[in-house]
Image (cartoon, helix red, strand yellow):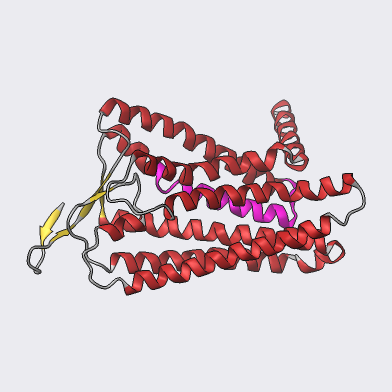
Amino acid sequence: MKKKSSMPNITALTGFILMGFSDAQELQTLCGVFFLGMYMESLMSNLIIITLITLDLQLQTPMYFFLKNLSLLDVFFVSVPIPNFIVNSLIHNNSISILACAFQVFLMTSFSSGEVFVLTAMSYDRYVAICFPLNYDAIMNNHTCGLMVGISWATGILFGAIYTAGTFSMPFCGSNVIPQFFCDIPSLLRISCSETLVVIYTSLGVGVCLGVSCFICVVISYFYIFSTVLKIPTTKGQSKAFATCIPHLTVFTVFLVTACFVYLKPFSNTPSISDRLFSVLYTVLPPALNPVIYSLRNTDVKSALRRLQQNLRLRRLLI
């Protein structure tokens, strides 16, 4: 996994070891089976949301168009680290090549960044729907929605490429152990032996600025949303307006809180098991909870699911 470089006293790495949750093979297998169950739940629930929105004509609205893209990003995001971890746990092999690690960093950064931008676009959609209901169809037309989603995906991929190029342009030396169950940039920076980290820190700075900008946009959107809703004279009208915003606000909060636990926690030279548990929450919790949050009190999604079940039963009877 290591080879001598031309620089003295430096051992360049050719691969990494991902730290699991236990060295005991029995517990590794148990973790693999547990994660397999969580992954299948997340995958199936998001695919159901995508299928319902694609097939049901009553869900062909901007809000559900954004939700479909969010579910798609969740499927891709959770499918990057979790299947690899499951396989590693079942075969008891935690090694990963530099190329595979680079792909993990690129894909996870791309999908998580894209998710931030889609969630920001969803907050703008709710802002227009509640503050400018008469102009909603004109403002949130197909072209605008497609443009916002396209920019979200493209910007996410751009960030993924920049971060991956910046991270893996640096030499790695010393320990080849990554204290996570997937490759992440903070862990890779710890084992970098580069004396200049200008490129990666500049790109991280740009990413933080854009992330903060998205957060501010969401806060401003909800400030105007709450101000408008509180002016509605009836309690029923207020409850109906809030009901369309609460799922998005909950999803955004869960994603933000879990990401902060992973990336804004104090630096530690000896990462604990809690650090890896927070990483699990960050990678699995949002994709698993998002479909549940959007379907629990959403009559449109529930009705669409019933219609799909009825259509499937009818086709079986006809066959």
Q: Nearer the viewer, residue 312 or 156?
A: 156
Horizontal relation, residue 20 to residue 110: left or right: left
Name the residue furthest right: 233
In the rendered view, would you say 272 is above or below 152?
A: above
> Which quadrant is the C terminus positioned in?
top right
Can residue 14 be seen in the rendering of this structure? yes
Asked which quadrant contains residue 194, the reply is bottom left
Q: Which residue is drawn at 49% across and 56% down?
A: 112
Q: Which residue is drawn at 34% across and 44% down?
A: 181
Q: What stretch is highlighted in magenta?
A: 56-82
In the rendered view, would you say 47 is above or below 264?
A: above
Q: Position of residue 171 (x, y in %)?
A: 22, 65
Horizontal relation, residue 264 to residue 211: left or right: left
Can residue 58 be seen in the rendering of this structure? no
Asked which quadrant contains residue 66, the reply is bottom right
Asked which quadrant contains residue 138, the reply is bottom right
Q: Residue at x 77, y 39 (%)?
A: 299
Q: Which of 219 and 157 is in front in this view?
A: 219
Q: Position of residue 280 (x, y in %)?
A: 43, 42
Horizontal relation, residue 87 to residue 305: left or right: left
